[in-house]
Image (tube, rainbow, N blue to C red):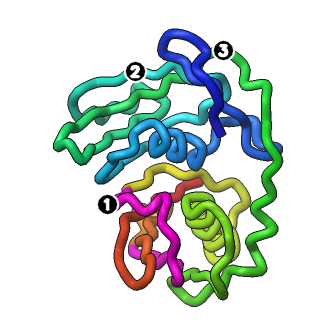
Amino acid sequence: MFLTKLGQNFEMFYLKGNRKYLHSTDIISYLFAKYKKIKSLDIKFYKIITGNPRLKIINKKVSSIKYDCVANLDLESKRLISLIFSGTKKKIVQSYSYNEELLYPYFKILKKKISLKKKIDWKIIDLLISMSKFYCEKKIGRKKWLVYRVIIDNNFITKNFKSVELILMKEIKKKIYVFEIILDKKSYGSIYYTY
């Protein structure tokens, strides 16, 4: 969650639940709130961000691991911009209540797929990230999972869907697991999880 501008190139974010780092879904939600006309998004998380991030906007595609997080946005105006998030020592002091375990009874896992048993009222990006994490914990093992990359091909963030599912498409070196996002039987992008 985010609130107000702190100063030049800073936004004030909140921590999700009991986490000590800025959550991927809060950064993604921030992007879709700030830029209403996003056609597609490709965001990579290279490092965990524990302090309020410094933001930099560049008018071209960026792919560099020297930053904590890089988001490439393709806007409806046919403009491509990149937002670079760099963690700072400005501590994130606020948090908001969040318990993703409340979602777990609604998830149904099959061999290479996870879906919702029934429609629930929850932010779609939070739902998808929780579903992929739950699949990784239950089917692959390990407790500590992190979102590495999210690709959104069509802006679905504010839409409602009858069916929500993720299909495990591939494993990269048994370290990165790639899920295809399927909403109402249509592909909307992918989520990459790692440990």
Secondary structure under tag 1 reads: loop
Q: How crowded is mark 1: few (under 14 residues within 10 Å), some or many (20 or more)?
A: some
The x, y position of residue 194, in whole percent, is 54, 55
Residue under numbered circle 1: 153
The span picked out in magenta is: 152-169
What distance separates the C-alpha of mark 2 from that of mark 1?
23 Å
Instruction: Tell me whether the residue at label 3 lies in contact with that at label 1, contact meaning CB atoms closer than 8 angstroms.
Output: no
Q: In which quarter of the image is residue 58?
A: top left
Residue ID at (72%, 80%): 106
Residue at the left extreme?
78
Q: Is residue 35 magenta?
A: no
Label 3 – label 2 distance at C-alpha:
17 Å
Sooner in the amino-acid sequence: mark 2 or mark 1: 2
The residue singled out by tag 3 in the image is 89
Indicate the position of residue 8 as horizontal and vertical percent values.
50, 10
Of callouts 3 and 1, which one flags the residue occurring earlier in the amino acid sequence?
A: 3
Q: What residue type is labelled 3?
A: Lys
Relative to residue 71, is residue 6 drawn left or right?
right
| Secondary element at image label 2 | strand
What amino acid is at disc 2?
A: Lys
Q: Residues within 10 Å of mark 2 (few under 14, many from 20)?
A: few
Quadrant of image for the C terminus? bottom right
